[in-house]
Image (cartoon, rainbow, N blue to C red):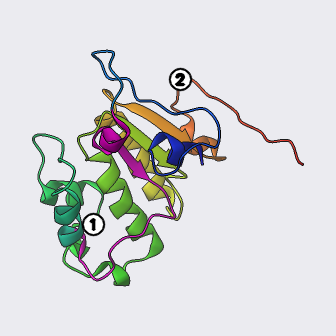
Amino acid sequence: TLLQTIAGAIMPSEGNAELVLSNQQSAPPEEIYQYISLTAPYLELIEEMSATEFLNFHFSFKPLIAGISIEQVIENVGLATAANKQIRYYSSGMKQRVQLAQAFFSDAPVLLLDEPCSNLDSTGFELYHRLIKEYCSNKIVIVSSNDVNEYSFCEKKLELGFIGF
């Protein structure tokens, strides 16, 4: 819920979420999507497309980071041999890699990760940590997870808890 509120996908019941740009001006709510990249297990992929088609489609709306091609993105997340196979035939781990690709390689200063390693094996966890190290040095990264392996690199941690009704 917190990440969806930050991303502008849902409105808070109280208060507000605001993105302040480097020039100290707030980004208008209808433009927040330009500054944020998000991945979460509940986000859907277009399963009739291949990874190549899907990422080309995604990056037609949100710019790809400079100096890298779709082919390099696919290679980077370990899907080169399945690049032209329909996503419907991917394992859950392969689908998660496509989601990581669209999030990490979007040219956006804020990266929101909700349970980013869902369905990933140990090789996938290594990939995740490599992507964090190589592509997030100039990004604000917010991770929502109960698994310390997904946020162990974070310098600041905020633990949220809810009291029952």
Residue at 61% across / 46% down in the picture? 145
Asked if residue 27 lies left or right of residue 8, the reply is left
Tag 1 residue: 79
Residue 95: x %, y % from top left: 39, 69
Residue at 29% across / 61% down in the picture? 78
Tag 2 residue: 155
Q: CA distance from mark 2 to mark 1?
A: 30 Å
Residue at 19% across / 65% down in the picture? 57
Does residue 134 belong to the magenta stretch? no
Does residue 35 belong to the magenta stretch? yes
Residue 84: x %, y % from top left: 19, 77
In the image as oriented, which residue stretches furthest toward the right? 165
The amino acid type found where label 2 is placed reads: Glu
The amino acid type found where label 1 is placed reads: Leu
Residue segment shown in magenta: 28-51
Residue 158: x %, y % from top left: 65, 29
Asked if residue 87 lies left or right of residue 143, the reply is left
- Compared with 45, 32 (above or below) is above
Residue 127: x %, y % from top left: 38, 50
